[in-house]
Amino acid sequence: MRVTTKLFATLRRGRFDIDTFDLPEGATVDDIITKLGIPENEVTLIFVNGRRADRATQLADGDSVALFPPVGGG
């Protein structure tokens, strides 16, 4: 199955902005994060098809995943 992944803010450093991956059926968001080598604590917000998700969310063909780092401000 093909899943589009978009990285935001600091997650883009040394990586891509948006890319499409071929994943096996039953793959989860965590599989993408692991495949990209992103440390666990660097992803705090996850959306799949515009809806809030978590690492265990199972993906389907054509899904769009957005990954965000911790957000700070003041």
Image (cartoon, rainbow, N blue to C red):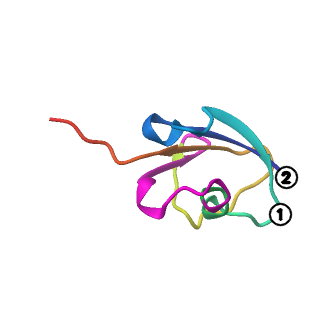
Dot 1: what SS? loop
Q: Which mark is residue 1?
A: 2
Vertical comparison of 5 with 29: above or below: above
Question: In x, y percent, where is residue 27?
Answer: 73, 64
In the rendered structure, which amino acid carries the disc numbered 2?
Answer: Met
* Among numbered discs 1 and 2, the one appearing first in the sequence: 2
In the rendered structure, which amino acid carries the disc numbered 1?
Answer: Glu
Dot 2: what SS? loop
Would residue 13 appear left or right of 60 to someone viewing this image?
A: left
Q: Residue at x 43, y 54 (%)?
A: 42
- The C terminus: image quadrant: top left
Would residue 10 appear left or right of 3 to someone viewing this image?
A: left
Question: In x, y percent, where is residue 64?
Answer: 67, 42
Q: Residue at x 41, y 46 (%)?
A: 69
10 Å neighbourhood of mark 2: few (<14), some, or many (≥20)? some
Would residue 20 appear left or right of 57 to someone viewing this image?
A: right
Question: In x, y percent, where is residue 32?
Answer: 66, 56
Span highlighted in magenta in the image: 34-50
Vertical comparison of 20 with 25: above or below: above
Q: Residue at x 49, y 42 (%)?
A: 11
Which residue, given by chain and number where applicable, does mark 1 sit on?
Answer: 25
Q: 71 or 13: which is nearer to us?
A: 13
Q: Residue at x 47, y 63 (%)?
A: 40
User: Which image quadrant for residue 57?
Assistant: bottom right
User: Which image quadrant for residue 58?
Assistant: bottom right
